[in-house]
Image: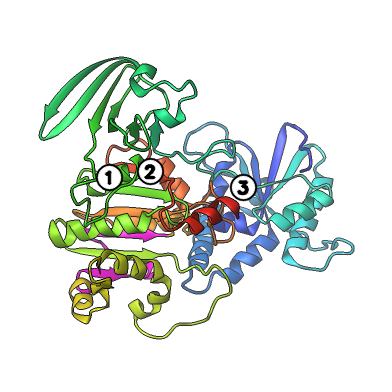
Amino acid sequence: MVRIDKKANRLYVLDTNVLIHDPAALYHFEEHDVVIPMTVLEELDKHKNGMREIARTARQISRTLSDLTAHVTPEEIQQGIPIPRVTGGPAGRLRFLCYQDLAPLETLENSPDNRILAETCRLRDERPDASVTLVTKDINLRVKATALNVPVEDYLNDKAFDDLDAMIEGAKVYADAGRDGRSLWESLDVEVMVERTDGHTLYHLEGSIPEDWHVGMLVSDSDNGAEFEAIVRSHGPRKASLQLLTNYRHHGGVWGVNAHDSRQNFALNLLMDPTIDFLTLAGSAGTGKTFMTLAAALQQTLDGKQFERIVFTRAPIPMGEDIGFLPGTEEEKMSPWMGAFHDNMDNLLRDEREGSSSWNDGATRQLIGSRVQIRSPTFMRGRTLNDTFLIIDEAQNFTPKQLKSLVTRAGRNTKIVCLGNVGQIDTPYLTANTCGMAAVVERFRDWPHAGHITLRSVERSRLALAAEELL
């Protein structure tokens, strides 16, 4: 990447994909000036028609620019339009690049990306007093800009966490994670008071509470065969409260599903906890995310009558080449994307003695089908889901804005579970730390009615485990 000179004035030239990725990007450059080339405005105009998300975003950006340029004279536009800052402080200015005699870059074809490069190069030559930087999420454009000695950056404001960090695991397993090999209670310098109330056992700790603890995380003394497993209910510098978990390794488990380690037991506890409204389950393929979630949903909907229906949805993003339009109703169109749902339902309703599944029976499908709905996220906008157990599969393929529109559908007595693996992202321009899954995990980290756990052990097969490690 080209070294950026630290000059007093900075001009950030925004690419089209930055504005489409984050319509509020204009406001995230503090006191520095933001420059929008005329090519970007033309690209936004091409995208504005239609009902796709990109069209809605393009229209939103156009409205934002219209509000900023309203009641502004042409002379003020030439000088730069002040960009209001919510936090106060010095504000930057919005400028537009319009070159009527723009010379194309030699040896490069006349494409929108190359015109943006040419506009940035000319602005850099005209403003030697300022640091001119092109901001784009297009990797190829960043490579070309670097080759032309144009300072270029990725848009980083949407990152939920830094590259040096990782998404929180939601667990602290001392026997496996402790460097000194000490057990849980040997590692803590605290005084403990035990309280039993409302059928729960609470451990009130006072002393030096670990800084990496947070509300809603698992604290365990072992990953397998743990004697102490608890969830952090409150956390402070000197005080914390832990609540013992229910052991779902035995006694029938949840809808016949048993936990095999501490993380799976914690996941089942969060799934069955009525005080947890929002839950995220992360993990590689075959860790049992969908299997345990469906088991808990069936248990609480059909047996416990806590919810009236189960709604299952996922991002219809293909892993390879798109197969084209699909016929039928909404559920029939979503059926090819719901292979994980059907496979897990087949296993959950399997009779171990007969070796067959009642999911194949028409009467069972009709009974459960009246309580289980498969829905496309495309038609979720504007809905309110009451008394619903909502499962959002492949959450890593949603942008933060798309996932927000789904989570805000929650009405009275609704529980939302997001499942995903940030290592398997199929949506362009999304990464492990900018996808919707990463955003909600980080934003809901300290909310007392949310939980998160990253599952580790692969339950699918030894082949799946080997593929996850070797490929």
Separation of disc 2 and disc 3 at Cα? Answer: 28 Å
424 displayed left or right of 176: right
Check the image and report above or below for 293 versus 125. below
In depth, the one of 344 and 65 nearer the eye is 344
Give the secondary structure at mark 2: strand
Counting residues from the start of the chain, the first of labels 2 and 1 encountered is: 1
Q: Is residue 376 magenta?
A: yes
In depth, the one of 440 and 191 nearer the eye is 191
**Magenta part of the chain:** 369-393
Q: Is residue 288 magenta?
A: no
Determine the residue located farthest toward the front in the rendered image: 353
Separation of disc 2 and disc 1 at Cα? Answer: 9 Å
Numbered circle sitting on residue 54? none
345 displayed left or right of 335: left
- The residue tagged 1 is 270
Numbered circle sitting on residue 453? 2
